[in-house]
Amino acid sequence: MSVIQPQPGIMDIELYVGGTSSVEGVSDVVKLSSNENPLGTSDAVKAAHGKTGHNLHRYPSTDHAELRAAIGEVHGLDKDRIICGVGSDEVLQFVTQAYAGVDDEVIYTEHGFSMYPILARMVGAKPVVVPERERVVDVDAILAACTDKTKIVFIANPANPTGTMIGGNEVARLADGLPNGAILVHDGAYTEYVEGFDGGALLVGARENVIMTRTFSKIYGLGGLRVGWGYASREIIDVLNRLRQPFNLSTIQMSVAEAAVRDQAWVRKCRSENARMRAWLAEALAELGVPSDTSTANFILARFADQDEAVACDAYLKSQGIIVRLVAGYGLPHCLRITVGDEASCRRVAHAVGQFKAKRNAPEDA
Ligand SMILES: Cc1ncc(COP(=O)(O)O)c(C=O)c1O
């Protein structure tokens, strides 16, 4: 009798766990578990979406020419070095399929985004986890972990779930120190939250071994649309396009994303509102005895005394209709990742954490 077996590594994949969005028995819920934009999408994007009901009997374009042209124009990039995918996740998948296989090594860091080991296993490669330094990517540790089997190094910058960043010189040092034939993936899902940051575009422009990935899911408020993109050398983009299904993006995805990227006023507004509320929330939590590293993204990694306190606080927040993210799976059992919501949500979080702390610190018989 034949036994049907999946490819090596596939059964080792732990399914990605997304942020929950409901609490049983609680109706007034605020979801701060998936780093979504609390302001949603701009009016221009809503209008573009409203116009997309026509010609749905037609197949979309296979080359994403208009969307790539818009991205290129807005960011000053060569449109022929851009690839679009179903979320940046799909671009990350193309890179992994293209450049890593059985027996190869894929490096990611201690608290790195959980899709990286999933992708490595998907192609039968070995995920190699490298320590961080106090929740910050450590370039020396990554370089020390490289071997002749290393094919891909994944870093997110800003990083999720820590919210920390490394500087351009450090990223360049990493790219330049990689073994021949290894590619650096500079995952820029949170780039737009950093004023004046190009997400690594300049670095890609000057090197053959770096790809930058970006998304419409975060600051553009389009997590439900599923559009992301990558920017790399023409040679790499040519390779990735061979793995891409011809119609991976629908007409709707492309036209809505194009309207979004052209509306940079919305991006500026969301960036400044995020910065304002992020600073407020970090300070409010710190005053309650819950510190966090300076975040460069749209979330805060709140540190508690230990895992027990983090889990208890998560449960209390849920009972108050506030959903945040437990990050024990990221090697951070004593932390909660809290998306920066709108002002009302941030105030609600701070108030609930204050209540939690007061109850926890109250003497037993009080
Ligand atoms: C660091 C990082 N990279 C990539 C992604 C994937 O984003 P998407 O596939 O929605 O573009 C996320 C989503 O949370 C993320 O945090």
Image: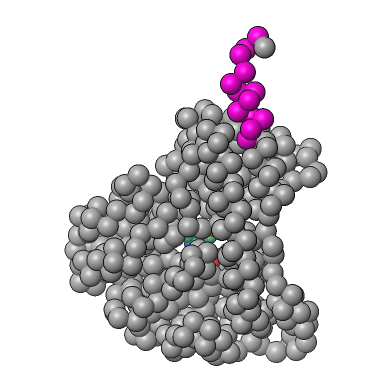
Residue located at (43% from left, 66% from top): 187
Q: Is residue 289 magenta?
A: no
Q: Is residue 327 visible?
A: no
* 234 to 165, vertically: above or below: below
* 240 to 126, vertically: above or below: below
Quick check: 136 left or right of 82?
Answer: left
Q: Main secondary structure of the magenta part?
A: helix
Residue located at (36% from left, 78% from top): 202
* 343 to 360, vertically: above or below: below
Closest to the observer: 294 or 22? Answer: 294
Counting the numbered discs, the total is 0
Residue located at (23% from left, 62% from top): 149
Splitting the image into 4 quarters, where does residue 172 fall? bottom left
Residue 7, given in percent of the width and then of the height, sits at 40, 60
Splitting the image into 4 quarters, where does residue 269 fall? bottom right
Image quarter in which the N terminus is found:
bottom left
Residue 36, given in percent of the width and then of the height, sits at 62, 59
Residue located at (20% from left, 60% from top): 147
Image quarter in which the C terminus is found:
top right
Closest to the observer: 60 or 261? Answer: 261
Residue 306, given in percent of the width and then of the height, sits at 47, 30
Region rendered in magenta: 353-365
Closest to the observer: 283 or 62? Answer: 283
Q: Is residue 262 visible?
A: yes
* 211 to 314, vertically: above or below: below
Residue 26, given in percent of the width and then of the height, sits at 78, 40
